[in-house]
Amino acid sequence: IIGMNFENLRHGVTTNGDGDGMPHRVTVTGCTVVSGTLAGLDTHAAGDDIIFSGNVLEGCGITVRSHGTTVVGNHIRNPQANGIMPGDTSPSKDVIVQGNTIIVPPDPSGASAIAAGPCTGLTISDNTILGSGSASNAITVNSAADKVAITGNYIRGWGKGGAGTVAIYASGSSTGADWLIAKNTLDATGGVASNMMNFGATITGLVIVDNIYKGTTSGTGITVPVGTIFRDPYDTATTSHGGTTRKFTTGAGNTSFSIANGGTNAISFATTNG
């Protein structure tokens, strides 16, 4: 499906099938979708090897509910709900979200650039994210997701000053496993009142390496569960969170948090958690 224009429709393109069959190997590229009343481009659970590439969406986003789906090189501006939604209402497998540009205004307040459900095998890489709703996060992934890689993304201006908003956030209380958070740039320049990352105590096998942090936030910088492998060039000289030296929170009730680091006095701890 190449070079189509869609305006004011429920979906410009979707897949279906359910009891009737399964769509395979469908590519949607170079299309323009304006003001889709739901997701401008969409898949239902029925679908395999679906590709959305190089499309422009204004006022709407992309929903993925099928397996083996790739969302690459799209430009999404001012979505009225979330920008890209992998595993929206069904647990999708093997989804790639790569190289997209997503621009989200502060209103509507609840719009994330990327909001993923409990997927298995989810890659979110090399996207440029500018903003999120004033009460929402830039990237939100359900904590029940397994085998998640969030790498190489540039994120700036999330939350637009909303208290408690986070650049990369694990939602829910289920326990997922095997997450890699690497080589992302989280740019809070301008004093965005929010947090850098928050994974609570729900992810096992969480690895956070080689991310870059810029600017200041008013909340705790990074919240991770005990057992996290953490290796980031966290610059305490230029990065401030909550007006204190606290950089990491491990959750109430945890009595210790061990981090291997190569610098003297490189990491400061609060005594909130003992």
Image (cartoon, rainbow, N blue to C red):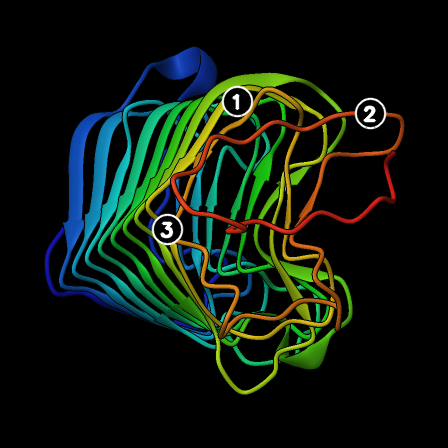
Across and down, in percent, residue 29 comes to 14, 55
Q: Secondary structure at mark 3?
A: loop
Decide if residue 30 is on the left or right side of residue 207.
Answer: left
- Mark 3–mark 2 distance (CA, rounded to whole Å): 26 Å
* Residue at 52% in and 22% down: 91
Q: Which residue is mark 2?
A: 255
Instruction: Please report whichever mark, 3 or 1, sits nearer to the chain's N-terminal start.
Output: 1
Q: Secondary structure at mark 1?
A: loop
Q: Which one is earlier in the sequence, the residue at label 3 or at label 2?
A: 3
Residue at image mark 3: 211
Q: Residue at x 54, y 23 (%)?
A: 145
> Residue shown at 61%/64% (left/top)?
111
The part of the image, by quadrant, that contains residue 182 is: top left
Q: Is residue 185 found left or right of 193 in the rendered image?
A: left
Q: CA distance from mark 3 to mark 1?
A: 28 Å
- Amino acid bearing label 1: Pro
The quadrant in which the C terminus is found is: top right
Disc 3 residue type (three-letter)? Asn
Q: Which mark is residue 114?
A: none
| Kind of residue at disc 2 | Thr
Please tell me how crowded label 1 is: few (under 14), some (14-19), or many (20+) other residues with Cα within 10 Å: some
Q: Determine whether 96 is above or below 130 in the image.
A: above
Q: Residue 215, how many percent across, how many down? A: 51, 76
Q: Residue furthest bottom?
A: 190
Quarter of the image where one finds residue 208:
top left
What is the secondary structure assignment of the residue under circle 2? loop
Instruction: Categorize mark 2 by other alpha carbons within 10 Å: few (<14), some (14-19), many (20+).
Output: few
Question: Of circles 1 and 2, which is in front?
Answer: 2
Residue 94 position in % (x across, y down): 32, 23
Name the residue tied to disc 1: 91
